[in-house]
C-alpha cells in the first residue's frame, strides 16, 4: 500500500488530479479486499490440514494450528494415494486422444471443408452444452453393452467422447486464424489432405495443443458426475475418493482438507505454470469464433 | 514452407472454403469417426433417453410397456420436483447476478493498467482450477449451520467480528438454503467472467474512447454509449456459459449438502437419486426436462453463431 500512496500523493499536487489519486487508492483497497476474500477458503484449507484432531474444533476454527502436525496429510494420503494413480491413468490418455482427434476435426472444419461443414460443426458443438443427465440412463446401458469395464477404461472413453466438441471448437478457431494461402499453396502444389495437415498444420499447432491438453486435463481431473456413475470408491478417481473421505461419519477435518489440497495439486500446478494458456482455453469455451 | 507461398499468390485465388478439384470424400472420411461417435453418444442417447422416459419402467427389470407422458405428468404434479425446479431457478438467478456483477467489477478495476494486475488476475482466477468436490470440502465447513459457541466457518467469523446478525443456517434453511450453494459457485466462477470482460475491455479500441472524449462525452456517457454496447456480446457469452453451467449444478451440491438433502435438491441431484433407486423412467424424464431447459438457452445461441459463420 505504501508504494501506491506515493504516486497518489504526487498526483494530488497537480490540480484536478486529486480525485484520480483518491480513486486509485480506493481501487487498490477494493482489489486487495477481494483478493483476501478469494484466498480465505485457501487459508482455511491450509491451516486446518495441519491441525491435530483435538485442535480442529469450532473455537479454533480461524486460528493457526497450536502445533503444526502432518498426521492429517498422511491419513489423507493413505486414502487418496491409489485414487491419484488411477486419475492420472485416466486423464493422460483421455486428454491426448481427444486433443489429437479435435485437431484433425478442427483442420477439416476450417481449412479443408466439405458441403454442410457448418451444420456438422454446429451439431458437434451442441454436445458441449448438453446436461449429461439427459444421456446418463441409456449411457450406462450402452457402456455395459459395449463391454467397457467400469472405472478407468469407461472414464477414458467418456472423457474422449464428450471432450470432442470443445477440442474441435478450440482447434477450429485456432486454425481459422491461419492464412488460407498457406493451405491453398500446398493444395496447388499437389499435397493431399493428410499431407497438408501433417506438414503445414501440425507444425504450427503447438500453442493450441497446450491450451486443449490443459483444458482437457483439468476438466477430466475435476469431473465428478461421470466418475459417480461409472466407478466406485474402489476403482474411481480422486474426486470420488475425496468425497468419500470428506463425507464419512468420522468428521476428520484435517484429513479432509489435506485431501482437498492433495486432489487439487496437479491442476493448480498446471494453472500456475500455464496460466496464460488456461485463460486461452476459457476464452475458447465462450464460443467466440 | 515459405517457398510455397508465392506460388499461391501468382495463381488466381479460389473462393474461400471451396474445395478445388480435391473433392469432399477425404475430409468427410477424416471427420467421420467423430460424427459417428457424437451421433451415437449425444443424439442417439438423447433419443434413447426420451424413449425410456416414455416407458413404464420403474425398476431394473425390462419395460412394462408404453406409458406416454405419464412420467412427466407425475413429475410436474410432484411437490418435490416443483421444489427442485424452484431451487434451480433461485440458484441460477443468484449465481448469474453474482458472477456477472463481481466479474464486471473486477475487470473494471483492472481494466486500466493496474499495478500487480497479473497477480490479482491470477488470484481471482485460481478457484477455477479446483474441482467443485475439493472446494466443497472447505465450503461445507465455511457454511456450517451451527451458531454461537458451536459455530465454525463463516458464522464463527461473523460472531468474532460482532456481526452476529449475519449468522444464519446457510444451506439448511428450508426456504432459501439453495442460495448458500450459490456462494461458493460465485467464488469459483467470478474470475472467469472477469477474464471474459477484461478481454472485452481490451478489445475496445483506444481511438473510440478518445473520439468520445473529444466530442465532450462525460465518463458516464462514455460508458453508456461506447463501452457498454461494445461489451454486450461478452456479457451475452458470459450469461450463456454461466447459465448453462448453473442449470447443470450437481458436484457442488453433492459435495456440500450431500445427495439426500431436501433443502438443496435440484433436478440433477434428483435424477441421480432416482437412478440409484432403479427408477429408470423417472430418472430419464428428469434428464430430458433438464435438456429442454438448457436447450431453450443454448439453441438460439448456437443458431445465431451458425448464421454468423455462414455470413463470413
Image (tube, coloured by chain):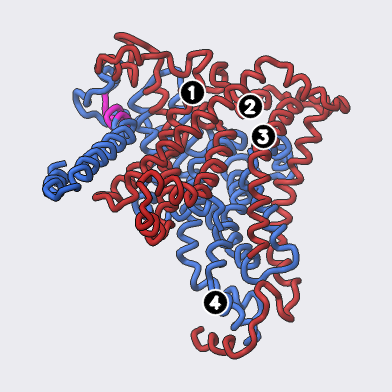
Which residue bears the numbered disc 3? B293
Which residue bears the numbered disc 1? B179
Chain painted blue: A
Q: Is residue A45 magenta-colored?
A: yes
Residue A8, percent from left and from top: 16, 46
Q: Give the extent of the magenta segment.
A: A44-51
Q: Nearer the viewer, mark 3 or mark 4?
A: 3
Please, is residue B127 above or below residue B252 in the view? Answer: below
- Element assignment for label 1: helix
CA gap between label 2 and label 1 equals 16 Å
- At label 2, counting other C-alpha atoms closer than 10 Å, the crowd grade (few under 14, some 14-19, many 20 or more) is many
Residue B230, percent from left and from top: 48, 52
The answer to which of B248 and B38 lies nearer the viewer is B248
Please, is residue B173 above or below residue A281 in the view? Answer: above
Instruction: Assess whether mark 3 and mark 2 are in contact (beta carbons under 8 angstroms).
Output: no
Q: Residue at x 39, y 55 (%)?
A: B212
- Element assignment for label 4: helix
- At label 4, counting other C-alpha atoms closer than 10 Å, the crowd grade (few under 14, some 14-19, many 20 or more) is some
Determine the residue located farthest toward the right in the rendered image: B65
- At label 3, counting other C-alpha atoms closer than 10 Å, the crowd grade (few under 14, some 14-19, many 20 or more) is few
Q: Residue at x 60, y 26 (%)?
A: B269
Which residue bears the numbered disc 4? A200
Q: Nearer the viewer, mark 2 or mark 3?
A: 3
Q: Earlier in the sequence, mark 2 or mark 3?
A: 2
Which residue bears the numbered disc 2? B267
Residue B192, quarter of picture: top left
**Residue A220 in sight:** no
Amino acid at each position: 500500500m505504501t508504494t501506491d500512496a506515493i504516486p497518489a500523493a504526487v498526483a494530488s499536487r497537480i490540480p484536478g488530479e486529486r480525485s484520480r489519486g483518491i480513486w486509485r487508492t480506493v481501487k487498490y483497497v477494493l482489489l486487495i479486499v477481494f483478493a483476501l476474500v478469494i484466498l480465505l477458503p485457501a487459508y482455511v484449507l491450509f491451516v486446518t490440514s495441519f491441525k491435530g484432531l483435538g485442535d480442529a474444533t469450532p473455537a479454533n476454527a480461524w486460528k493457526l494450528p497450536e502445533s503444526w502436525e502432518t498426521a492429517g496429510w498422511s491419513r489423507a494420503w493413505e486414502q487418496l494415494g491409489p485414487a491419484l494413480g488411477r486419475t492420472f491413468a485416466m486423464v493422460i490418455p483421455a486428454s491426448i486422444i481427444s486433443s489429437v482427434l479435435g485437431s484433425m476435426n478442427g483442420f477439416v472444419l476450417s481449412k479443408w471443408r466439405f458441403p454442410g461443414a457448418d451444420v456438422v460443426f454446429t451439431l458437434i458443438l451442441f454436445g458441449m452444452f448438453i446436461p449429461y443427465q439427459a444421456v446418463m440412463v441409456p449411457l450406462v446401458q450402452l457402456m455395459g453393452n459395449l463391454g467397457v469395464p467400469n472405472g478407468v477404461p469407461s472414464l477414458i472413453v467418456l472423457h474422449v467422447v464428450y471432450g470432442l466438441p470443445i477440442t474441435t471448437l478450440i482447434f477450429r478457431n485456432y486454425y481459422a486464424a491461419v492464412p488460407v494461402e498457406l493451405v491453398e499453396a500446398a493444395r496447388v502444389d499437389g499435397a493431399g489432405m493428410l499431407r497438408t495437415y501433417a506438414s503445414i498444420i501440425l507444425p504450427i499447432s503447438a500453442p493450441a495443443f497446450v491450451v486443449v491438453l490443459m483444458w482437457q486435463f483439468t476438466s477430466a481431473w475435476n469431473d465428478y458426475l461421470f466418475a459417480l456413475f461409472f466407478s466406485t470408491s474402489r476403482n474411481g478417481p480422486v474426486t470420488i475418493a475425496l468425497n468419500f473421505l470428506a463425507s464419512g461419519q468420522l468428521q476428520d477435518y484435517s484429513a479432509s482438507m489435506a485431501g482437498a489440497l492433495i486432489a487439487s495439486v496437479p491442476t493448480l500446478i498446471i494453472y500456475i505454470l500455464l496460466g496464460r494458456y488456461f485463460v486461452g482455453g476459457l476464452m475458447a469455451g465462450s464460443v467466440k469464433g | 514452407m515459405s517457398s510455397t507461398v508465392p506460388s499461391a499468390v501468382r495463381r488466381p485465388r479460389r473462393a474461400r472454403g471451396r474445395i478445388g478439384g480435391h473433392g469432399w470424400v477425404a475430409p468427410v472420411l477424416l471427420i467421420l469417426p467423430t460424427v459417428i461417435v457424437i451421433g451415437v453418444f449425444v443424439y442417439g442417447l438423447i433419443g434413447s433417453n426420451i424413449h425410456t422416459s416414455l416407458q413404464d419402467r420403474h425398476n431394473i427389470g425390462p419395460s412394462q410397456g408404453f406409458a406416454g407422458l405419464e412420467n412427466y405428468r407425475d413429475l410436474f404434479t410432484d411437490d418435490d420436483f416443483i421444489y427442485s425446479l424452484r431451487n434451480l431457478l433461485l440458484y441460477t438467478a443468484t449465481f448469474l447476478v453474482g458472477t456477472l456483477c463481481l466479474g464486471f467489477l473486477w475487470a473494471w478495476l483492472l481494466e486500466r493498467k493496474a499495478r500487480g494486475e497479473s497477480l490479482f488476475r491470477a488470484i481471482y482466477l485460481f478457484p477455477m482450477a479446483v474441482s467443485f468436490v475439493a472446494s466443497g470440502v472447505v465450503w461445507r465447513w465455511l457454511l456450517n449451520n451451527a451458531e454461537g459457541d458451536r459455530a465454525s466457518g463463516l458464522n464463527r467469523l461473523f460472531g468474532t467480528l460482532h456481526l452476529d446478525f449475519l449468522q444464519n443456517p446457510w444451506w439448511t434453511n428450508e426456504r432459501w438454503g439453495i442460495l448458500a450453494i450459490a456462494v461458493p459457485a460465485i467464488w469459483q466462477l467470478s474470475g472467469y467472467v472477469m477474464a471474459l470482460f477484461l478481454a472485452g475491455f481490451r478489445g475496445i479500441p483506444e481511438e473510440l474512447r478518445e473520439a468520445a472524449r473529444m466530442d465532450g462525452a462525460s465518463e458516464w456517457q462514455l460508458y453508456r454509449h461506447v463501452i457498454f454496447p461494445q461489451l454486450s456480446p461478452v456479457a451475452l457469452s458470459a450469461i450463456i456459459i454461466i447459465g448453462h453451467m448453473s442449470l447443470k449444478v450437481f458436484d457442488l451440491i453433492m459435495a456440500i449438502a450431500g445427495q439426500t438433502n431436501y433443502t438443496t435438491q435440484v433436478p440433477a441431484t434428483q435424477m441421480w437419486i432416482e437412478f440409484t433407486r432403479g427408477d429408470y423412467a423417472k430418472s430419464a424424464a428428469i434428464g430430458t426436462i433438464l435438456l429442454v431447459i438448457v436447450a431453450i438457452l443454448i439453441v438460439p445461441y448456437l443458431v445465431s453463431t451458425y448464421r454468423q459463420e455462414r455470413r463470413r
